Image: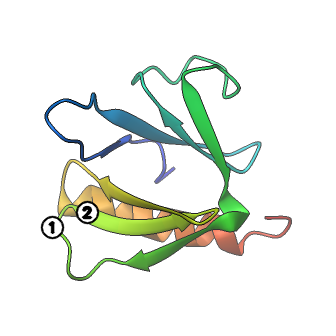
Amino acid sequence: RPLSVSLSLPSAASTPPRYVFVHEERGLLVVSKKPDKRKPYWHKDNTNFPLADCSIVTEDGVDADCFLLTCNHERLLLRADSATDRDRWVTGLRSEQGRPGR
């Protein structure tokens, strides 16, 4: 399950970090204020993007642990804990997008 790790959105000093999860059953990319995945995806602290509307823009030209994603005309720069985690996320997101019904 390559999408079980969390990502964070790089943030300015005054902005608290955000955490990113994939809700596989619903086909959603969930951006949360809290690192706790136990909250329901519809919780007020979460923003949801359909995976079908997300695409990886680039892995190049950004920090080694980051990649750029677009979801519903929003651009998200996502940072993983390591380049290996980033590669797992990129591979996992591409495979989720290729699944039937997504």
Residue at x 25% of width, y 82% of height: 60
Q: Amino acid at mark 1?
A: Asp
- Residue labelled with disc 1: 63
Residue 51 versus residue 9 in the image, above or below: below
In percent of width and height, residue 66 lies at 25, 63
Residue 66: mark? 2
Dot 2 and dot 1 residues touching (CB under 8 Å):
yes
* In the displayed structure image, the side of residue 13 where residue 49 appears, left or right: right
Q: Answer whether residue 87 is visible to the viewer in this image.
A: no
Residue at x 74% of width, y 69% of height: 99
In percent of width and height, residue 72 lies at 64, 62
User: How far is the residue under mark 2 from the one under mark 1?
Assistant: 5 Å
Q: Answer whether residue 52 is visible to the viewer in this image.
A: yes
Disc 2 packing (10 Å; few <14; some 14–19; many ≥20): many
Label 2, secondary structure: give it.
strand
Residue 14 versus residue 92 in the image, above or below: above
Closer to the camera in the image, 101 or 72: 72
Q: Amino acid at mark 2?
A: Cys
Residue 90 versus residue 22 in the image, above or below: below
In percent of width and height, residue 81 lies at 21, 47
Closer to the camera in the image, 28 or 13: 13
Quarter assignment of residue 68: bottom left
Disc 1 packing (10 Å; few <14; some 14–19; many ≥20): few
In percent of width and height, residue 6 lies at 38, 40
* In the displayed structure image, the side of residue 26 where residue 29 appears, left or right: left
Residue at x 72% of width, y 65% of height: 52
Locate the C terminus and report the quarter of the image it occupies: bottom right
* In the displayed structure image, the side of residue 68 where residue 82 appears, left or right: left
